[in-house]
Structure formats: C-alpha cells, structure tokens
Amino acid sequence: KKVDETRWTLSEQKFKEYSANNRHYEAIPIIMSYDNIEDGTEYLVIMKTEAGKCDIGVSVRYEQCDDKLLITGFHIDKRAIKEQHQLAMGYEHNKKCKCLDGWNSVNITNLIIGNVNQREIDEQRLHENIVNTRAMMNTLMSVPNASS
C-alpha cells in the first residue's frame, strides 16, 4: 500500500513571517550524528506557525571557531526528533521530559520552503543553457579554419 503524502509548500515570505513572530525560542538539544556525539549535538528551536498547521523544528549548530550559528535543517517529524532529543539527554530528564509537548505536529510528509515551481524554473534555465551552448558550438564548428 502506498503511503499518502501530505505536502506543504511554504513561501519564503511566509517562513520569514513565522520566524519574525516567534520571540520565545527554547533550544532543545538533539543528536544528529552518532559517529561523534559531541560534534553531533545540535539544538532545535520549535517555530510556531498557525492553528491547524505543523510547527517546524529548526536545528542549529554553533561554530565556535567562526562564532556563527548555522541552520542545519528543518524538521517536521516530531517522533524522530523526540528520539534524537532522548539520546541527547539523561534518563532522569527523559522520565519527565515535556520539551516537545508544545510542538503542534500535523501529518506532513514533505515540506518545501521557497518557490514551489523552482525545479521547473531550474530545468527551463538549464535547457536554455544547453540550447545556447549547442548553437555556439555549431557556429564555431562551421567557421572555416583561418590558418589554412
């Protein structure tokens, strides 16, 4: 049986609005890499969206050498994030953990942030580049050799 996909395309402008409206961030530790737990620890901020919509988890990592905070991902799977959070925390914390209770999780299987038509735009631009390159190559191939 094929699993039904629920897609949500979120414009860049709407994403910026959600981000601007969220003022009370709480960083929740999660493990994103099992190879090196220390380097694999990132922090998740739950970005509230609107009623009936899935909140978005934004994971970040602090790069101490550059003194930068980098966004490493966008997350919509609350269950997976809960497991990653439990790996980052000790048993005592996990027994009573309510860190993700405020996350409004709706069954979204695919989140797109940006222009929903970006793939088609990129394909068209690539096709135009190929056509232009072929035309230039044909022109160059048809020019007689000046050294003869």
Image (cartoon, rainbow, N blue to C red):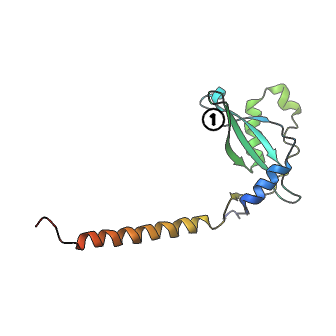
53 displayed left or right of 67: right
From what the image shows, is residue 120 above or below residue 21? below
Name which quarter of the figure residue 131 lies in: bottom left
Residue 50 percent across, percent down from the top left: 86, 57
Give the class, few, some or many, for how many residues have Cα within 10 Å of label 1's Cα (few <14, many ≥20). Answer: few
Q: Residue at x 41, y 68 (%)?
A: 130
Q: Which residue of the protein is positioned furthest toward the left in this rendering?
A: 148
Whole-percent x, y for residue 146 in the image? 16, 67
Residue 40 spot, x, y in % from top left: 65, 32
Check disc 1 and report its element: helix, strand or loop: loop
Q: What is the quadrant of residue 93 in the picture?
A: top right
Percent of width and height locating residue 99: 85, 38
**Pick the front one: 120 or 52:** 120
- As drawn, which residue projects farthest toward the front? 146
Q: Is residue 110 left or right of residue 22?
A: left
- Front residue of 102/118: it is 118
Residue at image point 78% right, 47% down: 78
Residue 55 seen? no
Residue carrying label 1:
33
